[in-house]
Amino acid sequence: MENMLGTENDHVSQLALAWEQKDLAVAAVSKDRDAAKEARGLRELVCDLVLSAAVPQRELLTALHALGQLLGEKGATPSYVSLTMDSARAVLSESDAERLGPSARAAVAEGYVAALRETSAREALVQWLPPAGIVRLSADAFSVAAQLPSREPDDISEWATRIARHLKERGARTAHIDGDPDLLTELKDTLLLAGIDVATPPATPPAGPQGSGSGGAGERKKGILSKILG
């Protein structure tokens, strides 16, 4: 029994390695080659699922979606991603390759696109982080324009925490905040938690990311404060 399992595992590893070699052969740039190497584990998982006839197709598609997502996260090119299913089918038997049909290609593509969108969203948020939207008014007073394209609670909390930490590190005692009403409550609570007074906006508040939710309680506040001070 152990010998049989060992033989099956060896076969899966050999298929995955052959698939990787074909992927590397069509990799046009270094990011494609790096992505191919990073995907070794998922490639073996896919091969194992393909060879297991009893495994539902949805489990295989889930693994392929994860493969596409990993390739997107590692910056693989669209041309490389579009060829990886051809590489996989080339090393499989004709009957096994049938499991990697149009739905398999779609799963890889969907995972890849999802990763690109997530990366793009993260990069878009960076321009709104401190010092964007912050202007020093005096030695210990700052004006803050509350602007952020995301409405995800975690993004807003992280943004407010970074602003509080930025101001705290620069000796702020007062912050004049104005901007998006959806953001002001979280920002105000976080600033107050950091020991920074919140005042009405000055006559000419800053606008947009060009410059140098509701508040939680208990353990959440302690976590935010530790981020600000740490």
Image (cartoon, rainbow, N blue to C red):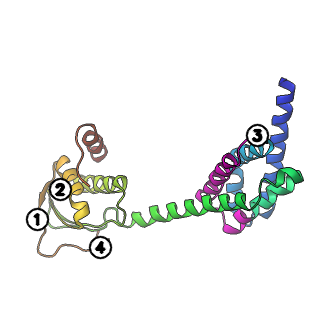
The front one of 68 and 143 is: 68
Question: Quick one: label 3 or label 4, which is nearer the N terminus?
Answer: 3
Q: Are marks 3 and 4 in contact (CB under 8 Å)?
A: no
Residue 57 magenta-highlighted: yes
SS category of the residue bearing label 1: loop
Residue 212 image-quadrant placement: bottom left
SS category of the residue bearing label 4: loop
Q: What mark, if any, has residue 208 been given in the picture?
A: 4
Is residue 42 rendered to the left or right of residue 166?
A: right
Residue at the disc numbered 3: 54
Residue at 84%, 50% in the rendered image? 96
Q: Is residue 60 above or below residue 121?
A: above
Q: What mark, if any, has residue 50 been given in the picture?
A: none
User: What secondary structure characterizes most of the magenta part?
Assistant: helix
Residue at 23%, 52% in the rendered image? 214
Asked if residue 75 can be seen in this view, the reply is no
Image coordinates for residue 51, horizontal then vertical, percent: 80, 43
SS category of the residue bearing label 3: loop
Q: What mark, if any, has residue 172 been given in the picture?
A: 2
Query: Which quadrant of the rendered structure holds the N terminus?
Result: top right
Rounded to the nearest angstrom, the CA distance separating label 3 from label 1 is: 65 Å
